[in-house]
Amino acid sequence: MAQPEKILVRGVNWLGDAVMTTPALQRLREAKPGAHITLLTHEKLAGLWHRHPSLDVVMTFAAVESVFSIARRLRVEAFTSAIVLPISPRSALEVFLARIPERAGLARPWRNWFLTRTVPPRAGAEAMRKRSAKEVRRRISAGSSRDVFPSTSHHMHDYLRLVAACGASAEPMAPLLSVGVDEVAAVKQRFSLANDTPLFGLNAGAEYGPAKRWPAERFVEAASLLHQETRCRWVLFGGPIDRELVGDLAGKLAAKIAGSNVINICGQTSLRELCAALKACEILLTNDTGPMHVAAALGTPVVVPFGSTSPELTGPISAAGVRHELILGEAPCAPCFLSECPVDFRCMTSITVPQVVAAARQARAFQHPDGR
């Protein structure tokens, strides 16, 4: 009896990017239902993949682990093929040193020699090229229009193109993560989230830099107005580096609405608990950052002010029955893809509180057409 294919997928290393690879993983599983599929991922992302239906096994590596150590561990598993999702030379070298016979990855200089199958870039693919401060000022002076890219530019398509070269469909689909009702119940109990009132999430940070962050005082004002309309409770999210920002925001919001309606869990969750808490929310008001992608993939509608980045390239993708609201500011220099604004931050300051509140209403009304 023939042995099943044993496929290694080398995962990407950033939270938002990892979520954007899930359509490719779903298509791979669809094409190869009998294969044994293992994902190799950085240990910080291990919790993201628990219970994922496209995977049989999740292997992890530490940031300090050498490429030779990883390759030795992979070699023992006797994989028949590898699909390398990152574009780094190191990720291709890992599977080469592991002596995996078939090794597919996107074509890039300095690593093609390590692969047996290189997939060329998509025609018309758009890179996130950072503008110089000089170019930003020139576009503002010229009164240029904000760059808008076709939907086919989304980075999800790069991963789909890669698995298509290995026999899967390249047809796009919504990202998918899996969280059990038991996990949601447990996180609600831990943080006292169980209540009859609506639960809304707020994620005001962005690890990439301040250019992605809608002003914190506007988050406070929008959250206060939405509480007045819905009597919701707000769960405040963030990582350890966001503690000061979120703590200040929590205090200001609690001064506007009853403190019992503000639950600050910033920096207190594991990645798995973060997933469960995001799943528990009716909507998430957030910047363009990793938790935005996680929430969207879990079916939680997101409301996102977009400034220096492009929703056409890396925005959330709606599944059936879910409506995300993406709000673009008026800035001829956007998207600049810079971490800090070199001028006056108009891409974000031009997005108003009433716009965000209206978008949140629309996202929620789509969920509750009966007006609940």
Image (cartoon, rainbow, N blue to C red):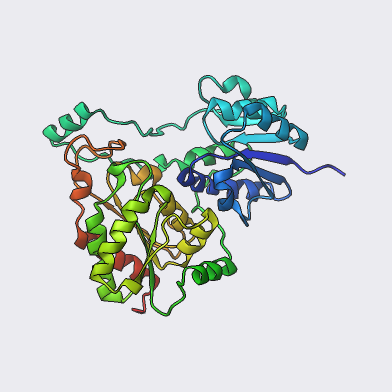
**Residue at 78% across / 44% down in the picture?**
4
**Image quarter of residue 67:** top right
Q: Quadrant of the C terminus?
A: bottom left
Please identify the quarter of the rendering in which residue 281 is found. Answer: bottom left
Q: Position of residue 311 (x, y in %)?
A: 35, 46
Q: Quadrant of residue 139?
A: top left
* Residue at point 11%, 33% (across, down): 141
Depth order, front residue of 343/240 = 240
Asked whether the viewer can see residue 336, the reply is yes
Q: How many marks?
A: 0
Tell me what residue is drawn at x 21 percent, y 53 percent. Answer: 351
Apparent side of residue 296 relative to residue 142 in the rendered image (left or right): right
Against 180, residue 326 (above or below) is above
| Residue 176 % position (x, y) | 53, 55
Give x and y (percent) for residue 355.
22, 60
Asked if 136 appears above or below 303 in the picture, the reply is above
Give the residue displayed 68% in from the left and 30% down from the top. 69
4 versus 261 height, above or below: above
Residue 3 on image: x %, y %: 82, 42
Q: Is residue 359 visible?
A: no
36 with respect to 120 (left or right): right
- Rendered-image quadrant of the N terminus: top right
